[in-house]
Amino acid sequence: MSDVFYITTPIYYVNARPHLGHAYTTIAADVSARFARMQGKDTYFLTGTDEHGDKIVKAAAKENQSPRTYADAISSLFRNLWPELSITNDQFIRTTDPAHIRVVQHLLQKIYDSGDIYFSEYEGLYCYGCERFYTEKELVDGKCPDHLTEPEKIREANYFFRMGRYQQWLIDHIHNNPDFIRPERYKNEILSFLREPLEDLCISRPTSRLQWGIPLPFDDRFVTYVWFDALTNYVSALGYPDGEAFQRLWPGVQHIVAKDIIKPHGIYWPTMLKAAGIPVYHHLNVHGYWNISETKMSKSLGNVVDPLDMKNRYGSDAFRYFLMREMVFGLDASFSEEAVIGRINADLANDIGNLFSRVIAMTHKYYNGTVPSPDGAKTALMDFGLQAGALETVTSFVHHMSDFAFHKALMAVWSFIGQLNKYIDATAPWELQKNAQEKELATVIYNLLEGLRVVTGLVAPVMPETSRRMQQHLALENSDIDAIDTLCQWGLVHPGAVLPKAVRLFPRIDVPSKENHKDE
Ligand code: ME8
Protein backbone atom coordinates (compact mmCIF):
# COMPACT_ATOMS: atom_id res chain seq x y z
CA MET A 1 0.00 0.00 0.00
CA SER A 2 1.40 3.33 -1.05
CA ASP A 3 2.03 5.77 1.80
CA VAL A 4 1.47 8.73 -0.51
CA PHE A 5 -1.99 9.90 -1.51
CA TYR A 6 -2.38 12.65 -4.08
CA ILE A 7 -6.02 13.29 -4.96
CA THR A 8 -7.40 15.64 -7.59
CA THR A 9 -10.86 16.84 -8.62
CA PRO A 10 -11.64 17.99 -12.14
CA ILE A 11 -10.77 21.64 -12.52
CA TYR A 12 -14.15 23.24 -13.09
CA TYR A 13 -15.07 25.47 -16.01
CA VAL A 14 -15.59 29.07 -15.07
CA ASN A 15 -18.55 29.53 -17.41
CA ALA A 16 -21.11 29.14 -14.61
CA ARG A 17 -21.43 29.26 -10.84
CA PRO A 18 -20.60 26.20 -8.72
CA HIS A 19 -23.49 23.77 -8.22
CA LEU A 20 -24.31 20.58 -6.37
CA GLY A 21 -22.40 18.35 -8.82
CA HIS A 22 -19.15 20.28 -8.30
CA ALA A 23 -19.73 20.23 -4.55
CA TYR A 24 -20.24 16.45 -4.56
CA THR A 25 -16.98 15.66 -6.36
CA THR A 26 -15.00 18.08 -4.22
CA ILE A 27 -16.53 16.75 -0.98
CA ALA A 28 -15.79 13.16 -2.08
CA ALA A 29 -12.17 14.16 -2.73
CA ASP A 30 -12.05 15.89 0.65
CA VAL A 31 -13.43 12.83 2.43
CA SER A 32 -10.82 10.64 0.76
CA ALA A 33 -8.04 13.11 1.65
CA ARG A 34 -9.14 13.31 5.29
CA PHE A 35 -9.26 9.50 5.40
CA ALA A 36 -5.73 9.27 3.94
CA ARG A 37 -4.50 11.67 6.64
CA MET A 38 -6.13 9.41 9.27
CA GLN A 39 -4.06 6.56 7.84
CA GLY A 40 -0.93 8.65 8.30
CA LYS A 41 -0.31 9.01 4.56
CA ASP A 42 1.57 11.88 3.00
CA THR A 43 -1.53 13.52 1.53
CA TYR A 44 -2.04 16.24 -1.05
CA PHE A 45 -5.37 17.47 -2.35
CA LEU A 46 -5.73 19.59 -5.48
CA THR A 47 -8.70 21.38 -6.99
CA GLY A 48 -9.06 24.47 -9.18
CA THR A 49 -10.58 26.04 -12.26
CA ASP A 50 -10.31 25.50 -16.02
CA GLU A 51 -10.34 28.94 -17.63
CA HIS A 52 -9.35 28.90 -21.29
CA GLY A 53 -11.37 28.16 -24.40
CA ASP A 54 -14.33 29.22 -26.42
CA LYS A 55 -16.90 28.36 -23.74
CA ILE A 56 -15.41 30.94 -21.40
CA VAL A 57 -15.05 33.58 -24.14
CA LYS A 58 -18.76 33.19 -24.95
CA ALA A 59 -19.88 33.28 -21.32
CA ALA A 60 -17.77 36.41 -20.69
CA ALA A 61 -19.12 38.13 -23.81
CA LYS A 62 -22.67 37.55 -22.56
CA GLU A 63 -21.80 39.55 -19.46
CA ASN A 64 -19.90 42.18 -21.47
CA GLN A 65 -16.69 41.28 -19.72
CA SER A 66 -13.23 40.29 -20.84
CA PRO A 67 -12.48 36.57 -20.44
CA ARG A 68 -9.90 37.45 -17.78
CA THR A 69 -12.25 39.55 -15.62
CA TYR A 70 -15.01 37.01 -15.98
CA ALA A 71 -12.72 34.06 -15.16
CA ASP A 72 -11.37 35.89 -12.09
CA ALA A 73 -14.88 36.41 -10.74
CA ILE A 74 -16.18 32.87 -11.24
CA SER A 75 -12.94 31.27 -10.12
CA SER A 76 -13.27 33.20 -6.82
CA LEU A 77 -16.77 31.81 -6.35
CA PHE A 78 -15.33 28.29 -6.43
CA ARG A 79 -12.33 29.18 -4.28
CA ASN A 80 -14.52 30.87 -1.65
CA LEU A 81 -17.13 28.14 -1.61
CA TRP A 82 -14.76 25.35 -0.55
CA PRO A 83 -13.98 26.52 3.00
CA GLU A 84 -17.74 26.90 3.58
CA LEU A 85 -18.07 23.16 2.95
CA SER A 86 -15.06 22.26 5.14
CA ILE A 87 -12.94 21.39 2.10
CA THR A 88 -9.25 20.98 2.99
CA ASN A 89 -7.57 21.35 -0.41
CA ASP A 90 -3.84 22.06 -0.28
CA GLN A 91 -3.83 24.01 -3.51
CA PHE A 92 -6.24 25.77 -5.83
CA ILE A 93 -4.88 25.85 -9.35
CA ARG A 94 -6.03 28.07 -12.23
CA THR A 95 -5.09 27.31 -15.81
CA THR A 96 -4.32 31.01 -16.21
CA ASP A 97 -1.53 30.75 -13.60
CA PRO A 98 1.81 31.54 -15.30
CA ALA A 99 3.43 28.46 -13.72
CA HIS A 100 0.76 26.21 -15.27
CA ILE A 101 1.15 27.85 -18.67
CA ARG A 102 4.90 27.19 -18.61
CA VAL A 103 4.37 23.50 -17.86
CA VAL A 104 1.78 23.09 -20.65
CA GLN A 105 4.27 24.58 -23.09
CA HIS A 106 7.06 22.40 -21.75
CA LEU A 107 4.95 19.26 -22.16
CA LEU A 108 3.87 20.21 -25.67
CA GLN A 109 7.46 20.87 -26.70
CA LYS A 110 8.60 17.58 -25.21
CA ILE A 111 5.98 15.55 -27.08
CA TYR A 112 6.58 17.59 -30.25
CA ASP A 113 10.33 16.95 -30.05
CA SER A 114 9.78 13.24 -29.61
CA GLY A 115 7.73 13.18 -32.83
CA ASP A 116 4.28 12.52 -31.37
CA ILE A 117 2.83 15.87 -32.47
CA TYR A 118 2.45 16.63 -36.18
CA PHE A 119 0.85 19.28 -38.40
CA SER A 120 -1.97 18.37 -40.75
CA GLU A 121 -5.08 19.59 -42.50
CA TYR A 122 -8.33 18.22 -41.18
CA GLU A 123 -11.95 18.47 -42.12
CA GLY A 124 -14.47 17.38 -39.55
CA LEU A 125 -17.67 17.96 -37.64
CA TYR A 126 -17.00 20.37 -34.85
CA CYS A 127 -19.18 20.99 -31.77
CA TYR A 128 -18.48 24.43 -30.34
CA GLY A 129 -20.10 23.47 -27.03
CA CYS A 130 -17.71 20.54 -26.51
CA GLU A 131 -14.86 22.27 -28.31
CA ARG A 132 -14.04 19.11 -30.19
CA PHE A 133 -14.51 17.26 -33.46
CA TYR A 134 -17.01 14.43 -33.62
CA THR A 135 -17.04 11.39 -35.87
CA GLU A 136 -20.36 10.59 -37.62
CA LYS A 137 -20.67 7.51 -35.43
CA GLU A 138 -20.52 9.43 -32.19
CA LEU A 139 -23.45 11.67 -33.15
CA VAL A 140 -27.02 10.85 -32.18
CA ASP A 141 -29.45 11.68 -35.00
CA GLY A 142 -26.71 13.85 -36.48
CA LYS A 143 -26.42 15.86 -33.25
CA CYS A 144 -23.88 16.19 -30.47
CA PRO A 145 -25.17 13.88 -27.72
CA ASP A 146 -24.33 16.42 -25.00
CA HIS A 147 -25.51 19.66 -26.56
CA LEU A 148 -28.19 18.27 -28.88
CA THR A 149 -27.02 20.67 -31.58
CA GLU A 150 -25.77 19.85 -35.06
CA PRO A 151 -22.00 20.17 -35.26
CA GLU A 152 -20.56 22.38 -38.02
CA LYS A 153 -18.36 21.05 -40.80
CA ILE A 154 -15.06 22.90 -40.61
CA ARG A 155 -11.76 22.54 -42.42
CA GLU A 156 -8.61 23.55 -40.64
CA ALA A 157 -4.90 23.00 -40.49
CA ASN A 158 -3.97 21.98 -36.97
CA TYR A 159 -1.55 20.10 -34.78
CA PHE A 160 -2.34 16.52 -33.84
CA PHE A 161 -1.16 14.27 -31.03
CA ARG A 162 -0.43 10.69 -32.18
CA MET A 163 -2.84 9.19 -29.69
CA GLY A 164 -3.60 6.22 -31.94
CA ARG A 165 -0.03 5.02 -31.48
CA TYR A 166 -0.77 4.27 -27.80
CA GLN A 167 -4.05 2.43 -28.25
CA GLN A 168 -2.72 -1.10 -27.75
CA TRP A 169 -0.52 -0.01 -24.88
CA LEU A 170 -3.58 1.50 -23.13
CA ILE A 171 -5.71 -1.60 -23.68
CA ASP A 172 -2.95 -3.77 -22.21
CA HIS A 173 -2.49 -1.41 -19.29
CA ILE A 174 -6.18 -1.56 -18.45
CA HIS A 175 -6.19 -5.35 -18.62
CA ASN A 176 -3.07 -5.61 -16.48
CA ASN A 177 -4.40 -3.17 -13.87
CA PRO A 178 -8.04 -4.15 -13.44
CA ASP A 179 -8.89 -1.29 -11.07
CA PHE A 180 -7.11 1.40 -13.09
CA ILE A 181 -10.55 2.77 -13.94
CA ARG A 182 -13.19 2.04 -11.33
CA PRO A 183 -15.98 1.11 -10.72
CA GLU A 184 -15.89 -1.59 -13.36
CA ARG A 185 -18.73 -0.27 -15.53
CA TYR A 186 -16.57 2.72 -16.51
CA LYS A 187 -13.57 0.54 -17.24
CA ASN A 188 -15.83 -1.39 -19.60
CA GLU A 189 -17.02 1.84 -21.16
CA ILE A 190 -13.43 2.88 -21.91
CA LEU A 191 -12.59 -0.57 -23.25
CA SER A 192 -15.58 -0.36 -25.56
CA PHE A 193 -14.36 3.01 -26.93
CA LEU A 194 -11.04 1.32 -27.50
CA ARG A 195 -12.60 -1.40 -29.64
CA GLU A 196 -12.77 1.18 -32.45
CA PRO A 197 -9.54 2.51 -33.94
CA LEU A 198 -8.32 5.42 -31.84
CA GLU A 199 -7.91 8.56 -33.91
CA ASP A 200 -5.18 11.10 -33.30
CA LEU A 201 -6.19 14.05 -31.16
CA CYS A 202 -6.36 17.59 -32.50
CA ILE A 203 -4.54 19.62 -29.85
CA SER A 204 -4.52 23.14 -31.33
CA ARG A 205 -6.95 25.87 -32.30
CA PRO A 206 -5.97 28.60 -34.79
CA THR A 207 -5.75 32.06 -33.25
CA SER A 208 -7.94 33.31 -36.10
CA ARG A 209 -10.77 31.49 -34.29
CA LEU A 210 -9.68 31.56 -30.64
CA GLN A 211 -7.14 33.69 -28.82
CA TRP A 212 -8.05 32.84 -25.22
CA GLY A 213 -5.64 29.97 -24.74
CA ILE A 214 -2.02 28.99 -24.28
CA PRO A 215 0.11 29.64 -27.40
CA LEU A 216 1.82 26.56 -28.82
CA PRO A 217 5.53 26.91 -28.05
CA PHE A 218 6.47 25.82 -31.60
CA ASP A 219 3.84 27.82 -33.54
CA ASP A 220 2.25 30.95 -32.12
CA ARG A 221 -0.45 31.02 -34.77
CA PHE A 222 -2.20 28.44 -32.61
CA VAL A 223 -3.39 28.10 -29.03
CA THR A 224 -3.61 24.82 -27.12
CA TYR A 225 -6.80 22.75 -27.13
CA VAL A 226 -8.44 23.25 -23.71
CA TRP A 227 -8.39 19.57 -22.74
CA PHE A 228 -4.65 19.26 -23.36
CA ASP A 229 -4.21 22.44 -21.32
CA ALA A 230 -6.58 21.38 -18.52
CA LEU A 231 -5.39 17.79 -18.00
CA THR A 232 -1.85 19.05 -17.59
CA ASN A 233 -2.91 20.82 -14.36
CA TYR A 234 -2.48 17.54 -12.48
CA VAL A 235 1.28 17.64 -13.04
CA SER A 236 1.82 21.39 -13.32
CA ALA A 237 0.38 21.86 -9.83
CA LEU A 238 3.27 19.79 -8.42
CA GLY A 239 5.95 21.64 -10.34
CA TYR A 240 6.56 19.03 -13.06
CA PRO A 241 9.19 18.16 -14.22
CA ASP A 242 11.68 19.06 -11.51
CA GLY A 243 9.58 20.06 -8.51
CA GLU A 244 10.19 18.23 -5.24
CA ALA A 245 6.41 17.89 -4.82
CA PHE A 246 6.15 16.17 -8.20
CA GLN A 247 8.83 13.61 -7.35
CA ARG A 248 7.29 12.92 -3.95
CA LEU A 249 3.56 12.93 -4.68
CA TRP A 250 3.08 11.81 -8.25
CA PRO A 251 3.66 8.10 -7.41
CA GLY A 252 0.49 8.23 -5.25
CA VAL A 253 -1.87 9.97 -7.68
CA GLN A 254 -5.58 9.21 -8.08
CA HIS A 255 -8.24 11.25 -9.83
CA ILE A 256 -11.99 11.66 -9.20
CA VAL A 257 -14.35 12.70 -12.00
CA ALA A 258 -17.97 12.15 -13.00
CA LYS A 259 -18.89 9.97 -15.96
CA ASP A 260 -19.19 12.99 -18.32
CA ILE A 261 -15.43 13.29 -18.63
CA ILE A 262 -14.16 9.74 -18.61
CA LYS A 263 -12.95 9.88 -22.20
CA PRO A 264 -10.44 12.71 -21.68
CA HIS A 265 -9.35 11.17 -18.36
CA GLY A 266 -9.42 7.52 -19.40
CA ILE A 267 -7.94 7.92 -22.90
CA TYR A 268 -6.35 11.31 -23.66
CA TRP A 269 -4.62 11.70 -20.30
CA PRO A 270 -2.97 8.27 -19.95
CA THR A 271 -1.74 8.40 -23.55
CA MET A 272 -0.42 11.94 -23.05
CA LEU A 273 1.42 10.76 -19.92
CA LYS A 274 2.81 7.76 -21.75
CA ALA A 275 4.02 9.93 -24.63
CA ALA A 276 5.71 12.30 -22.19
CA GLY A 277 7.37 9.44 -20.31
CA ILE A 278 5.45 10.14 -17.09
CA PRO A 279 4.09 7.13 -15.15
CA VAL A 280 0.29 6.93 -15.37
CA TYR A 281 -2.03 7.49 -12.41
CA HIS A 282 -3.15 4.63 -10.14
CA HIS A 283 -6.89 5.02 -10.28
CA LEU A 284 -9.49 7.00 -12.11
CA ASN A 285 -12.46 6.99 -9.70
CA VAL A 286 -15.66 7.70 -11.59
CA HIS A 287 -19.02 8.65 -10.11
CA GLY A 288 -22.46 9.11 -11.63
CA TYR A 289 -24.70 12.15 -11.92
CA TRP A 290 -26.86 13.85 -9.40
CA ASN A 291 -30.24 14.18 -11.02
CA ILE A 292 -33.14 16.32 -9.98
CA SER A 293 -36.34 14.33 -10.37
CA GLU A 294 -34.73 11.97 -12.88
CA THR A 295 -33.35 14.82 -15.04
CA LYS A 296 -29.69 15.84 -15.18
CA MET A 297 -29.08 19.07 -13.34
CA SER A 298 -28.26 21.79 -15.82
CA LYS A 299 -28.29 25.52 -16.01
CA SER A 300 -30.46 25.59 -19.10
CA LEU A 301 -33.12 23.51 -17.37
CA GLY A 302 -33.05 25.89 -14.41
CA ASN A 303 -32.88 23.04 -11.87
CA VAL A 304 -29.47 23.80 -10.43
CA VAL A 305 -28.99 23.28 -6.69
CA ASP A 306 -26.77 25.88 -4.99
CA PRO A 307 -24.46 24.20 -2.45
CA LEU A 308 -24.22 27.34 -0.35
CA ASP A 309 -28.00 27.41 0.05
CA MET A 310 -27.89 23.82 1.22
CA LYS A 311 -25.16 24.59 3.72
CA ASN A 312 -27.06 27.58 5.06
CA ARG A 313 -30.24 25.55 5.39
CA TYR A 314 -28.91 22.26 6.79
CA GLY A 315 -25.30 22.85 7.86
CA SER A 316 -22.15 21.72 6.10
CA ASP A 317 -21.80 18.41 7.95
CA ALA A 318 -25.38 17.27 7.35
CA PHE A 319 -25.12 18.21 3.67
CA ARG A 320 -21.82 16.34 3.31
CA TYR A 321 -23.26 13.32 5.09
CA PHE A 322 -26.30 13.27 2.84
CA LEU A 323 -24.24 13.39 -0.35
CA MET A 324 -21.82 10.70 0.74
CA ARG A 325 -24.47 8.37 2.15
CA GLU A 326 -27.10 8.77 -0.55
CA MET A 327 -25.07 8.26 -3.71
CA VAL A 328 -23.79 4.78 -4.50
CA PHE A 329 -20.39 5.78 -5.89
CA GLY A 330 -20.50 5.02 -9.60
CA LEU A 331 -24.29 5.20 -10.04
CA ASP A 332 -26.61 8.14 -10.57
CA ALA A 333 -28.54 9.48 -7.59
CA SER A 334 -31.53 11.69 -7.16
CA PHE A 335 -31.43 14.87 -5.12
CA SER A 336 -34.39 16.29 -3.25
CA GLU A 337 -34.70 18.29 -0.07
CA GLU A 338 -37.23 15.75 1.22
CA ALA A 339 -34.49 13.12 0.97
CA VAL A 340 -32.00 15.40 2.78
CA ILE A 341 -34.48 16.02 5.59
CA GLY A 342 -35.34 12.32 5.77
CA ARG A 343 -31.69 11.38 6.30
CA ILE A 344 -31.08 14.19 8.79
CA ASN A 345 -34.03 13.07 10.91
CA ALA A 346 -33.42 9.33 10.71
CA ASP A 347 -29.64 8.92 10.59
CA LEU A 348 -28.40 12.06 12.29
CA ALA A 349 -31.01 13.32 14.78
CA ASN A 350 -32.22 9.82 15.66
CA ASP A 351 -29.42 7.29 15.34
CA ILE A 352 -26.19 9.08 16.11
CA GLY A 353 -27.68 12.12 17.87
CA ASN A 354 -29.84 10.15 20.30
CA LEU A 355 -27.11 7.66 21.10
CA PHE A 356 -24.72 10.48 21.90
CA SER A 357 -27.15 12.39 24.16
CA ARG A 358 -28.30 9.21 25.84
CA VAL A 359 -24.78 8.05 26.78
CA ILE A 360 -23.62 11.47 27.96
CA ALA A 361 -26.86 11.90 29.91
CA MET A 362 -26.34 8.53 31.68
CA THR A 363 -22.77 9.52 32.56
CA HIS A 364 -24.20 12.64 34.16
CA LYS A 365 -27.04 10.83 35.86
CA TYR A 366 -24.94 8.05 37.40
CA TYR A 367 -21.54 9.75 37.75
CA ASN A 368 -22.13 13.51 37.69
CA GLY A 369 -20.45 13.60 34.31
CA THR A 370 -17.19 11.98 35.42
CA VAL A 371 -15.95 9.08 33.29
CA PRO A 372 -16.06 5.96 35.51
CA SER A 373 -13.23 3.39 35.67
CA PRO A 374 -14.13 0.09 34.04
CA ASP A 375 -13.71 -2.92 36.23
CA GLY A 376 -11.18 -5.29 34.65
CA ALA A 377 -12.82 -8.35 36.15
CA LYS A 378 -16.18 -7.46 34.62
CA THR A 379 -14.90 -6.46 31.17
CA ALA A 380 -15.42 -9.77 29.39
CA LEU A 381 -18.75 -10.37 31.10
CA MET A 382 -20.18 -7.00 30.15
CA ASP A 383 -18.72 -6.87 26.63
CA PHE A 384 -21.51 -8.49 24.57
CA GLY A 385 -19.27 -8.51 21.47
CA LEU A 386 -18.78 -4.74 21.55
CA GLN A 387 -14.99 -4.59 21.24
CA ALA A 388 -14.99 -7.12 18.41
CA GLY A 389 -17.78 -5.11 16.74
CA ALA A 390 -15.72 -1.93 16.95
CA LEU A 391 -12.71 -3.59 15.39
CA GLU A 392 -14.75 -5.19 12.61
CA THR A 393 -16.34 -1.83 11.90
CA VAL A 394 -12.97 -0.10 11.59
CA THR A 395 -11.71 -2.86 9.28
CA SER A 396 -14.73 -2.69 7.04
CA PHE A 397 -14.67 1.13 7.06
CA VAL A 398 -11.03 1.15 5.90
CA HIS A 399 -11.79 -1.36 3.18
CA HIS A 400 -14.74 0.59 1.75
CA MET A 401 -13.13 4.01 2.07
CA SER A 402 -10.06 2.78 0.19
CA ASP A 403 -12.41 1.66 -2.61
CA PHE A 404 -14.24 5.01 -2.64
CA ALA A 405 -17.42 3.17 -1.57
CA PHE A 406 -18.30 5.97 0.83
CA HIS A 407 -21.92 4.88 1.28
CA LYS A 408 -20.80 1.40 2.37
CA ALA A 409 -18.25 2.83 4.80
CA LEU A 410 -21.01 4.92 6.39
CA MET A 411 -23.38 1.95 6.48
CA ALA A 412 -20.76 0.04 8.46
CA VAL A 413 -20.48 2.91 10.96
CA TRP A 414 -24.25 3.13 11.31
CA SER A 415 -24.47 -0.57 11.91
CA PHE A 416 -22.03 -0.12 14.82
CA ILE A 417 -24.20 2.74 16.10
CA GLY A 418 -27.06 0.23 16.02
CA GLN A 419 -24.91 -2.22 17.97
CA LEU A 420 -24.25 0.42 20.63
CA ASN A 421 -27.97 1.12 20.95
CA LYS A 422 -28.65 -2.60 21.32
CA TYR A 423 -25.87 -2.81 23.90
CA ILE A 424 -27.75 -0.31 26.05
CA ASP A 425 -30.89 -2.43 25.82
CA ALA A 426 -29.00 -5.68 26.52
CA THR A 427 -27.09 -4.38 29.55
CA ALA A 428 -29.92 -2.15 30.89
CA PRO A 429 -27.79 0.26 32.92
CA TRP A 430 -30.87 1.43 34.87
CA GLU A 431 -31.32 -2.14 36.19
CA LEU A 432 -27.65 -2.35 37.12
CA GLN A 433 -28.05 0.84 39.10
CA LYS A 434 -31.23 -0.37 40.76
CA ASN A 435 -29.48 -3.60 41.78
CA ALA A 436 -26.39 -1.75 42.99
CA GLN A 437 -24.16 -3.62 40.52
CA GLU A 438 -21.62 -0.82 40.62
CA LYS A 439 -18.74 -2.52 38.84
CA GLU A 440 -20.96 -3.73 36.06
CA LEU A 441 -22.51 -0.29 35.63
CA ALA A 442 -19.12 1.45 35.53
CA THR A 443 -17.91 -1.02 32.91
CA VAL A 444 -21.00 -0.58 30.74
CA ILE A 445 -20.89 3.22 30.79
CA TYR A 446 -17.18 3.18 30.09
CA ASN A 447 -17.71 0.82 27.16
CA LEU A 448 -20.39 3.06 25.73
CA LEU A 449 -18.10 6.08 25.92
CA GLU A 450 -15.39 4.05 24.21
CA GLY A 451 -17.81 2.99 21.50
CA LEU A 452 -18.71 6.64 20.97
CA ARG A 453 -15.03 7.52 20.73
CA VAL A 454 -14.64 5.07 17.86
CA VAL A 455 -17.74 6.54 16.19
CA THR A 456 -16.35 10.09 16.43
CA GLY A 457 -13.21 8.98 14.60
CA LEU A 458 -15.08 7.15 11.88
CA VAL A 459 -17.43 10.03 11.10
CA ALA A 460 -14.56 12.55 11.06
CA PRO A 461 -13.82 12.49 7.30
CA VAL A 462 -17.46 13.10 6.40
CA MET A 463 -18.61 15.26 9.35
CA PRO A 464 -15.50 16.95 10.70
CA GLU A 465 -17.28 19.59 12.78
CA THR A 466 -19.66 17.11 14.43
CA SER A 467 -16.79 14.76 15.12
CA ARG A 468 -14.84 17.56 16.83
CA ARG A 469 -17.84 18.53 18.95
CA MET A 470 -18.40 14.96 20.04
CA GLN A 471 -14.73 14.55 20.87
CA GLN A 472 -14.83 17.66 23.04
CA HIS A 473 -17.75 16.13 24.91
CA LEU A 474 -15.75 12.98 25.48
CA ALA A 475 -12.81 15.08 26.72
CA LEU A 476 -10.63 13.71 23.93
CA GLU A 477 -8.02 16.25 23.10
CA ASN A 478 -4.97 14.44 21.77
CA SER A 479 -4.16 15.21 18.21
CA ASP A 480 -4.00 11.64 16.90
CA ILE A 481 -7.45 10.78 18.19
CA ASP A 482 -8.72 10.12 14.65
CA ALA A 483 -5.76 8.02 13.54
CA ILE A 484 -6.91 4.63 12.28
CA ASP A 485 -4.41 2.94 14.62
CA THR A 486 -6.00 4.71 17.58
CA LEU A 487 -9.47 3.60 16.51
CA CYS A 488 -8.33 -0.02 16.59
CA GLN A 489 -7.46 0.27 20.29
CA TRP A 490 -9.83 0.02 23.25
CA GLY A 491 -9.58 1.95 26.51
CA LEU A 492 -8.51 5.47 25.52
CA VAL A 493 -11.30 7.52 27.11
CA HIS A 494 -9.80 8.85 30.35
CA PRO A 495 -11.44 7.66 33.59
CA GLY A 496 -11.87 10.67 35.86
CA ALA A 497 -12.33 13.11 32.99
CA VAL A 498 -15.30 15.42 33.44
CA LEU A 499 -17.61 15.59 30.46
CA PRO A 500 -19.63 18.66 29.53
CA LYS A 501 -23.40 18.18 29.45
CA ALA A 502 -24.72 16.82 26.19
CA VAL A 503 -25.96 19.07 23.45
CA ARG A 504 -28.27 18.08 20.66
CA LEU A 505 -26.04 17.35 17.67
CA PHE A 506 -28.78 17.52 15.05
CA PRO A 507 -32.20 18.96 15.82
CA ARG A 508 -35.04 17.22 14.00
CA ILE A 509 -36.36 19.14 11.02
CA ASP A 510 -40.09 19.42 10.51
CA VAL A 511 -41.02 18.35 7.01
CA PRO A 512 -42.30 21.47 5.25
CA SER A 513 -45.88 21.16 4.11
CA LYS A 514 -46.69 21.39 0.40
CA GLU A 515 -47.95 24.96 0.98
CA ASN A 516 -44.52 26.13 2.15
CA HIS A 517 -42.94 24.61 -0.89
CA LYS A 518 -45.07 26.36 -3.45
CA ASP A 519 -43.03 29.49 -3.90
CA GLU A 520 -39.61 27.79 -3.89
O1 ME8 B 1 -15.68 19.15 -17.40
N1 ME8 B 1 -23.57 15.22 -10.93
O2 ME8 B 1 -15.60 21.02 -16.04
P1 ME8 B 1 -17.11 21.12 -15.49
C1 ME8 B 1 -22.36 14.93 -10.42
N2 ME8 B 1 -13.29 21.69 -17.03
N3 ME8 B 1 -21.24 15.61 -10.70
C2 ME8 B 1 -21.34 16.64 -11.54
C3 ME8 B 1 -22.57 17.00 -12.14
C4 ME8 B 1 -23.73 16.24 -11.78
N4 ME8 B 1 -24.94 16.50 -12.24
N5 ME8 B 1 -22.35 18.06 -12.94
C5 ME8 B 1 -21.02 18.36 -12.84
C6 ME8 B 1 -15.10 20.12 -16.93
N6 ME8 B 1 -20.41 17.51 -11.99
C7 ME8 B 1 -13.66 20.35 -17.26
C8 ME8 B 1 -12.79 19.40 -16.46
S1 ME8 B 1 -10.44 18.38 -15.73
C9 ME8 B 1 -8.91 18.36 -16.30
C10 ME8 B 1 -11.33 19.48 -16.75
C11 ME8 B 1 -18.98 17.54 -11.60
O3 ME8 B 1 -17.21 22.42 -14.79
C12 ME8 B 1 -18.28 16.25 -11.98
O4 ME8 B 1 -17.12 16.14 -11.23
O5 ME8 B 1 -18.07 20.81 -16.58
C13 ME8 B 1 -17.95 16.49 -13.42
O6 ME8 B 1 -16.98 15.58 -13.91
C14 ME8 B 1 -17.44 17.92 -13.34
O7 ME8 B 1 -18.33 18.53 -12.35
C15 ME8 B 1 -17.50 18.66 -14.65
O8 ME8 B 1 -17.17 19.99 -14.38
Image (tube, rainbow, N blue to C red):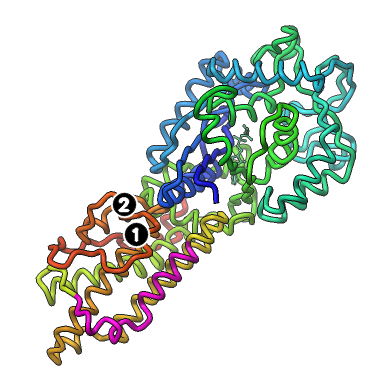
Question: What kind of residue is marked 2?
Answer: Asp
Residue identifier under label 2 = 480
Which region shows up in magenta?
A: 374-397
Give the secondary structure at mark 1: helix
Q: Main secondary structure of the magenta part?
A: helix
Question: What kind of residue is marked 1?
Answer: Thr
Which residue: 34% across, 59% down? 486
Is residue 226 among what the camera can see? yes
Image position, residue 347 (x, y; %): 41, 66
Quadrant in which ligand 1 is drawn: top right
Which residue: 55% across, 51% down? 1
Residue identifier under label 1 = 486
**Mark 2 neighbour density, 10 Å: few (under 14) some (14–19) many (20 or more):** some
Residue 376 magenta-drawn?
Answer: yes
Query: Where is 380 relative to 480, above or below?
Result: below
Q: Quadrant of residue 372?
A: bottom left
